[in-house]
Image (cartoon, rainbow, N blue to C red):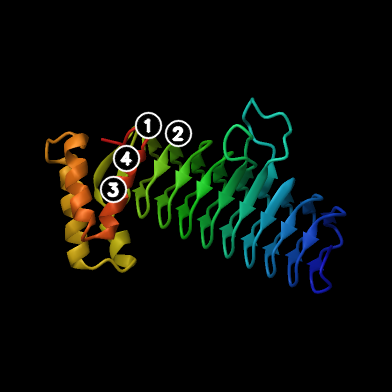
Amino acid sequence: MIHESAQIHPAAVVEEGAKIAANVTVGPFTYITSGVEIGEGTEIMSHVVIKGNTVIGKDNRIFPNAVIGEENQDKKYSGEDTRVIIGDRNVIREAVQIHRGTVQDKTQTVIGNDNLLCVNAHVAHDVIVGNHTHIGNNAILGGHVTVHDHAGVMALSAIHPFCTVGAFAYIGGCSAVVQDVPPYVLAQGNHATPFGLNLVGLKRNGFEKPELRALQKAYKEIYRSGKTLAEVKPILAEMALEWDSVGRFVDILENSERGIIR
């Protein structure tokens, strides 16, 4: 179904069964398969490929040569009907790849709202990306990675499968992340190590001095106190009673599968 207000270039291929909402534009030489759903106001430029059971929300901008919903690169994948789900107002730049999920994990790859995925970024199967993130040029999110809200993964950085990047964390360019990055933390290197809090990002997002001091105290408990993580957890849990934001530290310490960067 193609809405009457959608503008489909004559050189584009939109298979029967695709759902194209109002005010969508589709550029030349773009290929959209049956089963794809495109939300209202989304702009799809030339030479884009969108395949499979893929749902894309409203007011996204998808630049040339992006590939969304293609078969993933997991050897276990055998053609199962897995998904890609993308929210609203994302900017997906040239040659970004977003692969469908696997039945062995979430069955879907999910991108939230208001994200910027820069040129040639790779989002592998079963990745979960939150809202307001920045994924840099040539960054790689390995399979099963989670990137929480307002995080940044800068150019040429690679996140190992099953790792988590916490909210408001910032991964500097050319980094290799092989363990979880706690929220708010600035990390850099191969392998990535912590360099304090992402203070610039926190201030830009409205964190005030009292809360920043609480987060700095929590960071010092984790990284500079000499205490074990088991000793730190109850201290942070008590701090979280006053500051909800400190609770994100508690969550990652409780739930990390690969451990946190040190």
Of the pair 22 and 187, the residue shown nearer to us? 22
At label 1, the amino acid type is Arg
Q: Looking at the rendered structure, which numbered label has been put on residue 160?
A: 2
Number of other residues with Cα within 10 Å of mark 3, as a class: few under 14, some 14 to 19, many 20 or more: many
Q: Could you give the CA–CA distance between mark 3 and mark 2, rounded to whole angstroms? A: 20 Å
> Is 2 situated left or right of 42 in this image?
right
* 4 or 2: mark nearer the eye: 4
Q: Position of residue 61 (x, y in %)?
A: 63, 62
Where is residue 101? Give x, y as percent.
Answer: 62, 39
Residue drawn at (63%, 48%) of the image = 95
Q: Tag 3's secondary structure? A: helix
Which label lies toward us, 1 or 2?
A: 1
Q: Kindly check if marks 4 and 3 are in contact, taking CB atoms under 8 A apart as contact.
A: no
- Provide the residue designation for mark 1: 258
User: Disc number at residue 249?
Assistant: 3
Distance from Cα at disc 3 to Cα at disc 1: 15 Å
Q: Nearer the viewer, mark 3 or mark 2?
A: 3
CA–CA distance in space, label 4 to label 2: 20 Å
Q: Earlier in the sequence, mark 4 or mark 3?
A: 3
Badge 1: residue crowd in 10 Å (few <14, some 14–19, many ≥20): few
Relative horizontal placement of residue 98, taking residue 45 as reference (left or right):
left
Residue 149 visible here:
yes
Q: Earlier in the sequence, mark 3 or mark 1?
A: 3
